Image (cartoon, grey):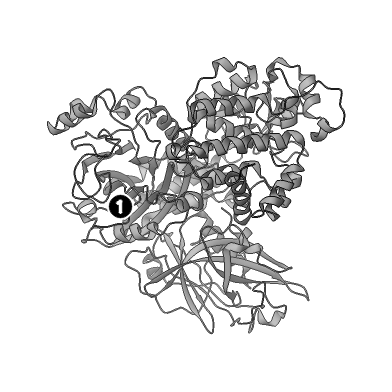
Amino acid sequence: MDQSVAIQETLAEGEYCIIAVQGVLCEGDSRQSRLLGLVRYRLELGGQEHALFLYTHRRMAITGDDVCLDQIVPISRDFTLEEGSDVTIQLDTVELSLVFQLPFGSHTRMFLQEVARACPGFDPETPDPEFLWLSRYRCTEPEPEPEPELELQGESPVTLGGSSFDSLRPDGKGLLSDQSSWSQDKSENLFTRQSKSKSEITEMVRSSTIMVSDKAHILSMQKFGLRDTIVKSYLIQKEEDYSYIQNFRFFVGTYNVNGQSPKECLRPWLSHGIQAPDVYSVGFQELDLSKEAFFFHDTPKEEEWFKAVSESLHPDAKYAKVKLIRLVGIMLLLYVKQEHAEYISEVEAETVGTGIMGRMGNKGGVAIRFLFHSTSICIVNSHLAAHTEEYERRNQDYKDICSRMQFCQVDPSLPPLTINKHDVILWLGDLNYRIEELDVEKVKKLIEEKAFQTLYAYDQLKTQVAAKAVFEGFTEGELTFQPTYKYDTGSDDWDTSEKCRAPAWCDRVLWKGKNITQLSYQSHMALKTSDHKPVSSEFDIGVRVINQELYRRTLEEIVRSLDKMENANIPSVSLSKREFCFQNVKYMQLQVESFIIHNGQVPCQFEFINKPDEESYCKQWLNAKPSRGFLLPDSDIKIELEVFVNKTTATKLNTGEDKIEDILVLHLDRGKDYFLSVSGNYLPSCFGSPIHTLCYMKEPILDLSPKTIRNLTLMPVQAEDDGSQLEKPMEIPKELWMMVDYLYRNAIQQEDLFQQPGLRLEFERIRDCLDTGMIDTLSASNHSVAEALLLFLESLPEPVICYSAYYSCLECSGNYTASKQVISTLPTFHKNVFNYLMAFLQELLKNSAKNHLDENVLASIFGSLLLRNPAGHQKLEMAEKKKAQEFIHQFLCNSP
């Protein structure tokens, strides 16, 4: 998330936050989170200067209310800028010296590059040829900081100097207008190039003189153009000519801690009886089960478990933390031996929530990807849907994580990487697959007999993998340990609670890739903190390492051959197909068509380009994967065209204002353009239709003519008050009634309603039932119908509480009488829907003993759906989100 928005809200006129990054302020043993913002300030007499604004903050900084200005450091003296796996920067002024650690990755790199550009004397035209991918500037060398035992240090600290800046405005906003206070004692040659001896450089982490991954990074930068892209492609093609495979020991661990804090030493799990691993990847699930963690993603448990892991790593080696990533209760930690740190590069981390509406992070996955030497590795930690019968939901969670987990590349012009675009994939977590078809006692008897292979035949994950429903191409080791779930906390006894869960192998480790040998796969019964037992697996993984001399020879050969063919021909390609027809496109139902680009005898770059006066190369409902790329001579690439209609595009397609029609322009660098025709038809849906339109539709939407749908959709919201001669409308949309009535009859006591996702296939059936009016065929799980209701409310082009009433609602949240008055001013149809929904939610709350719902949960879920920012500001800021929840909360706690 872009946290510079929060900083911008604190700034005065003339001040602009260019970029922000979250870091850790290191003061002795203390570690405190800080937000660093690079701020540009326009001087009254012309010109501009820059400073680093340092903020304390709470949680993820979303608005100005979440941050508090701590210090300002003007950028006015020499500095060095170098980066390693966790970048260490040092800020020095006359009166202070601060050390920060920033996460390694593309965003930090971008931040440091922007700081470099902001420095007086920066000259982008004179790059250091040997260290082109780093910006190095002269400074007075700082005293070396002691290296923390568990934090990966960068090559050398970034040192920023500046004059003291004590004069903050009383309101805490902005800088003084006195431009002399921004900088002092400047000179033209302040930033002369830094010159370091070869011996000094090679001792640094990730020295660019020895890393092929860094050379690939150089080649991927846009400024190098087509020629260097060709060089990079040939280098990858000839990789075996200059590299060899070397084995490294990887430890993979997973532990569902059931919301507990660490109560025992983790060494029996992480380090007893094993050789010191080269790489540790440690995953947790259910780190925190509190509502605060669920809704606001904030938890003290992160630091507790991080510390517990760090203290339990193998004592025979020193380790560096590469990355920590967390989504609510799902956390993944990555460590490497310190001697390997210089060979770690291109570290990125991402999260995917698969909870209700694909948003909530109570279920989902986190992942870290990186290059180790020149092998790309992706490690995924996931927590999939619970309950024995929900295996299809687990399958869907897995597919959602695979499709939605995308990592930015070093070159921002390249498409994101997916999980499967890596040489090695390690997947760990509480996958939640259960044992089926056997009763609890039979399962326990087989465990007692250690008949694990007999029991494994009934394992859902084994069954689903065999059916190629999930984890296709992955491997799992033999299960020689007893199931890891469910135990009475603090013991090795099976669950004795009222539910008496059957034992299951919920916690698993799988892998995919070449040169991978599993050495062990076991559970650890000694740990009793949770109702799960932790699982570990050791691997020897073959990593591709570069022989530098052979690499240089190969590079020289490639460059020589390119010199001969550089201007030989104009690139040309052939396309297997140029016309694409998408029939009967439906709301939120993906359709895909593909074609092949075959290249001729000249290397070429291709890209779909914008048509004149258009902001994108295609309409919003269309996407090409990949949209750009590179082809070697006589090679092919498959392009997929995806059509997906969502809440953003549905309304115009319903009315006929937009159609499934577009022209794509495929452009070849130094070559010609190719035109592709996209056509099709969209089936109108109640999803994306306005409330008042649906109230006038007594017939199913698919039974109406396009002209009727258009006229009813474009009718003003207040049409019911104008004495219209239209047939008398219904009080609420029939589609809304169908879903609420279904839930009222079937799900009033359903546990986790509106919190557990449904199945996508069931949503499609529900949508079709609503659009065809075939209510008798509405058959789906309660969770699927509940999610469909939320998606219906989200798709309304005008929310239940109209945009015009939005700010009035926020102002009177906490005043129930005033809030009721605002609702009374809504258009009749909107007011009816609001009152109907509140009555239904109050009925649910009457059954809270069974369904475990409470006013806070429902207010949080429905607050962001019924109250939405006016068009153009759709996303609720944190302060507004809380007020929206308070507004809905009043109606849930008070009788109408």
Q: Is residue 746 left or right of residue 658?
A: left
Secondary structure beneath disc 1?
A: strand
Residue 192, position as x, y percentages in the image: 57, 74
Residue 146, position as x, y percentages in the image: 35, 74
Tag 1: Cα neighbours inside 10 Å, few (<14), some, or many (≥20)? many
Residue at horizontal 24 percent and vertical 57 percent from the top = 264
Residue at horizontal 75 percent and vertical 38 percent from the top = 614
Give the mark count.
1
Identify whether 789 is placed above or below 189.
Answer: above
Residue at horizontal 69 percent and vertical 54 percent from the top = 812
Regarding residue 344, the answer to whether it shows in the image is: yes
Identify whether 878 is placed above or below 163.
Answer: above
Which residue is the site of mark 1? 280
Q: Residue furthest front?
A: 895
Regarding residue 570, the answer to whether it shows in the image is: no
Give the quarter of the image for residue 675: top right
